[in-house]
Image: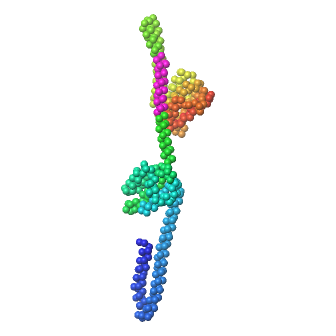
Amino acid sequence: MPSSVKLSLAFLVFGTAWILFSDSIAWSISDHDPVVYNNIQRYKGIAFMVLGAGLIYYISHRYYAKVQKARKQEQEILERYQLLGMATNDAVWDYNIQTKQCYTNRALQEMFGYTEDELQDNYHWWTNNLHPEDKERVLDTIDAKLDTGGTVWQDEYRFRCKNGDFKTIFDRGFIMRNAAGQPYRLIGAMQDVTEQRLLQDTLIEAQTRHKDELARSVLQAEEAERKKLGEELHDNINQLLGVVKLYIQHALVNPAVREELLHKCASYITQTIEEIRSLSRSLLPPALNEQSLLESLYQLIEDISHAREIEFHVRHAGFDESQVPENRRLVLYRIIQEQLNNVLKHSNAAGVIIDLKPSDGHTLLTIRDDGVGFDVSEVRPGMGLNNIRNRIEVFNGDMEIISAPGEGCTLKVKV
């Protein structure tokens, strides 16, 4: 009930009670003397005015104190709300659906370049500046929330600034409803995510480009393997089988030298079998479930030592390969195999040190040779190093190459 109505009712009750009871009391006091009664009536009117004024003052003072207290609390809430709006980087907005009044903090005004006066009619300002391609979708989502009883609405859209540029905005609002479930107020915050989305797009583009490069590297590696296989078959195995064929043909028409030629054929066939076996070992993955990584590594070193006089030193103190998954062990083996192939082709090294050790849940692999080295800034990585890098990136690993002319080369890998 409004305070003015309460005050009027109180005065009406007081006046009615005064009239009903004061007259009978005055008549009794005057002892039924009309002259005395008239004198009392004059004083009674003065008393009524004094008491009525006191009653009005008392009641209005109480209501005024309550109003002042409510205004003070409202002012404190408003100041707290304004301080909160200043303390956050989010663009805060508060829209009263019934009165159409809207509050926005300074961050929102600075975010889009509009003045506080330009934001008074917030709803039309907001809807008019939505990107044409996003407008229908955004309005449909918020209308659906308002109509279906939802309390939280959020969406991402493009919004026009005062200078005409569009920013990507993540907007999140809370819908306040009355006891009947009708919405009466919206409070929310807008975040400028333009830079984040640009970075995401750049990252996605870089990832797509990297996948394409990785696919090309895989195809190039496959072509290189095919070329290597073709060269081995043509230069070694094909030549040996060609000689065997000639010896057999010659033995068929020359019985005198047949036995000698057949012995040579057997020797060349044995050599051919060894060449095929060696080629197969280089192409097929090692059976790490049957043979450990270190055993496969030593076997690889032994095979290389038959072809080149290189002194190998393998260090693996503290390395427990049972803690390394098989797919990562295979990657480590392939990296070692690839780098040793690079050493054989390019380094002219006399010694190689291979170091395997654990470090904070990672495996550190270092391969160091004493060969001719190269200038890292001038030499473009070849297919071998690119293959190593691609294998490492699959497991989010790191690779570092340290080299200089005349100082050998060091490959450091962390997986």
The residue positioned farthest toward the front in the image shown: 164
Q: Main secondary structure of the magenta part?
A: helix
Residue at 42%, 86% in the rendered image:
22
Which residue is drawn at the image coordinates 43% and 79% (left, top)?
Answer: 11
Where residue 126 appears, x then y in whole percent? 45, 55
* Relative image position of residue 24 (x, y in whole percent): 40, 88
Q: Nearer the viewer, residue 415 or 391?
A: 391
Residue at figure coordinates x 49%, y 72% from the top left: 65
**Quarter of the rendering containing residue 345:** top right
Q: Nearer the viewer, residue 190 or 414?
A: 190
Name, please, the residue furthest toward the top: 256
* Residue 185 visible at all: yes
The magenta stretch is: 215-239
Tell me if 406 is positioned left or right of 82 in this view: right
Determine if residue 90 is in view. no
Question: Is residue 237 positioned above or below 181 on the image?
Answer: above
Quarter in which the N terminus is drawn: bottom left
In the image, residue 200 lies at what x, y percent? 48, 44
Residue 404 image point, x, y percent: 61, 30
Q: Is residue 384 above or below residue 260?
A: below
126 in the magenta segment: no
Foreground of the two, 378 or 133: 133
